[in-house]
Amino acid sequence: MRFRRLWTNHFRNLESQWIDLDAQEVILVGANGQGKTNLLEALYTLCYGSSFRTAQLRELAQNGQKEFKLVALYGDEEALEHTLELEYKESKRSVILDGKLIKDRKHLIYNIPCIVFSHDDIAFVRGEPEARRLFFDQTMSMYNPLFFDDLRRYRQILRQRNLAIKEGRDSLLPIYDQQLARHGISIQAERTATTARFNEIFPPLYREISGDEVNIEVSYTPSWRNCATEEEVATYLANHRDRDRVMNTTTSGIHRDRFVITCDGQPFSQIGSTGQLRLASLVLRSAQM
């Protein structure tokens, strides 16, 4: 897929204009603050319906504006031309592809995959566990729309279960336990498989680029590490309800899983230099493709 042209209106500091992008390689040149990253963010926002820099779409509008619009012309692998539009207006996002409203964002993620290399990617190696879960979940969502469905449904059920715990509605917990187990065990299985695939690509690629003969890999530790079936997860959740009530939240699940980049069996974040960690984050992005 190749972008042909991009039009922006009230997006960040970019002027309202058409920008030609129809080339094998596009190099952005300019001083700091002129909008190079903002242009990349505009393309990413069109591809995902969200930004890689903020979770709040309203922050993408120019100062003094409450809305913005992006339009892109692109060609797919079969050389067919498409028009993609994203508008943020009255605190609502709408995405239109070839004149048809896209109601489910997963169709963007799966059909228009986009990978961004950012200086913030170092968080995948030395940041909090949430950053690594986000990276791997994003990777799986790009290639497997069913994973995106499971992840979204899991988050919905998790919110409902946590609310039931806080409000003392214990009669609902068995229902939520079964639903959480169904989607959670599927996500756990996909994360396990994806970790194995990354460890076929990531370690040799890192060694080739760095020149260091180190044993670097991705380690995945599920919260439900001793559960292999939906029934085992549901039983585990039932057996730990008292702990969940004390903590006022669901204390186990795929939202507690841990991905760690290790080197010779140790967390790379603790022994690697800043340069090594940044290189590892770049290699992770490369492996994502």
Image (spheres, rainbow, N blue to C red):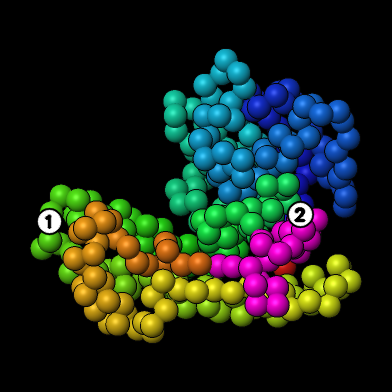
Label ID, residue 274? 2
Instruction: Classify residue 86 by image quadrant.
Output: top right
Percent of width and height locating residue 211 = 89, 71
Q: Which residue is the extreme one toward the front? A: 271
Q: Is residue 51 above or below residue 265?
A: above
Instruction: Classify residue 63 by image quadrant.
Output: top right
Q: Which amino acid is tagged 1?
A: Arg
Label ID, residue 169? 1
Where's the N terminus, which quadrant?
Answer: bottom right
Q: Nearer the viewer, residue 224 or 58?
A: 224
Q: Residue at x 64, y 53 (%)?
A: 123
The local secondary structure at tag 2 comes to helix
Percent of width and height locating residue 80 = 72, 55
Q: Earlier in the sequence, mark 1 or mark 2?
A: 1
The local secondary structure at tag 1 comes to loop
Q: Residue at x 80, y 56 (%)?
A: 275
Percent of width and height locating residue 256 = 42, 64
Q: Residue at x 72, y 48 (%)?
A: 118
Label ID, residue 130? none
| Magenta-drawn segment | 259-285
Where's the C terminus, which quadrant?
Answer: bottom right
Whether residue 110 appears in this view of the structure is no
Q: Is residue 282 magenta?
A: yes
Left or right of 205? Residue 51 is left
Q: Is residue 192 magenta?
A: no
Whether residue 131 appears in this view of the structure is yes
Mark 2 surroundings: few (<14), some (14-19) or many (≥20) residues within 10 A: few
Percent of width and height locating residue 113 = 65, 57
Choose mark 1 or mark 2, whichever is in front: 2
Q: Nearer the viewer, residue 203 or 106?
A: 203
Q: Nearer the viewer, residue 165 or 157?
A: 165
| Tally of numbered discs | 2
